[in-house]
Amino acid sequence: MRVGILGGGQLARMMVLAGTPLGLEFTVLDPAEDACAGVIAKQIHAAYDDEEALDRLANNCDLVTFEFENVPAAVAARLARHAPVFPPPQALATAQDRLLEKRLFDQLGIPVARYRAVDDLAALRQAAAELGLPAVLKTRTQGYDGKGQRVLRKEDELEAAWRELAGAPCILEAMIPFQREVSQIAVRDRHGEVRFYPLCENSHRHGILMTTRASPDDPLQGAARQHTRKLLESLHYVGVLALEFFVRDGELLANEFAPRVHNTGHWSIEGAISSQFENHLRAVTGLPLGETDARGPSAMVNLIGELPPSEALLALPGVHLHRYGKAPKPGRKIGHVGIQAPSSAELEARIRRVEAIIAGVGQAAA
Ligand SMILES: Nc1ncnc2c1ncn2[C@@H]1O[C@H](COP(=O)(O)OP(=O)(O)O)[C@@H](O)[C@H]1O
Ligand SMILES: [Mg+2]
């Protein structure tokens, strides 16, 4: 079966790596000359709104899926003329607009931080007065890895923040003093069967994911699954989806969802019986889903900006290195390390050793 992927970054690359043993063939569409999935799959070099290229992708594939969600609705509609498209374009349209996303959570009874739509400076002042400060101003569309956001702590910061975000339509969200951040990754197949990965606990630095730990015994697992199931069913979803939460005083508050494979699921490549990439492909191609259980204590650490020497990382037990083949650049995700261990205590020890190696590279460069 031939699978088209819109986007040719590391998520597409890891899908190709997972789907090749299943006999799937891949074409990615990406404008970048050096798209890192283009090394191991066919690539159509074209802009995402190039209609001829979109038709070519869909005509040459049995179905089309996505590695990222910022796809204009017109693109998904164009693809859908010639091939089935999974996940459903409606899920992408909702996930790419923080206001629509929050309203859907509200509608489904999934708790969220208090928020207001903000379309001009006067509305921002009003929203800040209603929600109180600190609060987080986020552009409704195009944000990722903490980009397109400003934390507002004092009233005199509102105007500058509004200008920095170029007056784009925004939402203002109450700042949540969370104790933890977790994400639920789930997969739903074409017949409506849903499987859940263990809840993941995530830590971020400067708005960028650094570390994920699979947390199969998490007390919030049940609640996270209930919320995620509602979301998947309401969207008639097919494929892998990730739902991110803040944990405040033992309660889940939904932050955002991603209609795709997700960075907080990369541990599953070695750490779960079937990875999120394999299960996404099984779901969209109509194959039976694989087991989502963890094989044991598992974690993932991102490699951001620069790569430590492979030799140092691979000298550690239970470590797998994934280099994405991307040029190093500050703040860019260019690889990750999967870590497994026989016990939780040993997993923590191994994470610390990986982090020390990463910190060593940062110091050498500084
Ligand atoms: N309302 C909030 N309160 C506290 N922290 C927040 C809030 N919104 C975002 N953050 C922090 O910023 C990170 C990135 O924000 P997020 O909304 O997930 O955007 P994205 O992942 O698309 O960049 C979150 O994982 C969290 O650490
Ligand atoms: Mg996020």
Image: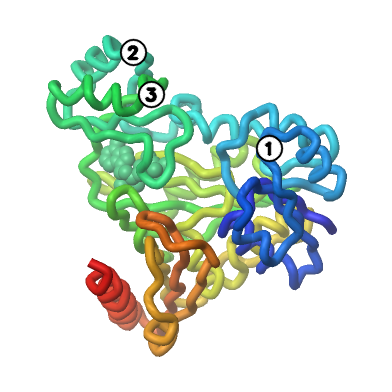
The circle on residue 256 is none
Q: Where is residue 170 in the image (x, y as percent from the top left)?
A: 38, 24
Disc 3 versus disc 1: distance between alpha carbons?
Answer: 25 Å
Within-10-Å neighbours for mark 3: few <14, some 14–19, many 20+: many
Dot 1 corresponds to which residue?
88
Q: Quadrant of residue 110?
A: top left
Q: How far apart are marks 1 and 2 (CA)?
A: 32 Å
Image disc number at residue 120: 2
User: SS of the residue at dot 2?
Assistant: loop
Amino acid bearing label 1:
Pro
Residue drawn 35% across the image and 43% down it:
146
Quadrant containing the C terminus is bottom left
Give above or below for 296 relative to 254. below
Percent x, y of residue 38: 67, 60
Mark 2 residue CB less than 8 A from any atom of ligand 1? no
Q: Residue 171, can we see it?
A: yes
Looking at the rendered structure, the kind of residue marked 2 is Asp
Task: Give the secondary structure at mark 3.
Answer: strand
Q: Which mark, residue 170?
A: 3
Seen in the image, is 229 located left or right of residue 352?
A: right
Q: Position of residue 180 (x, y in %)?
A: 28, 52
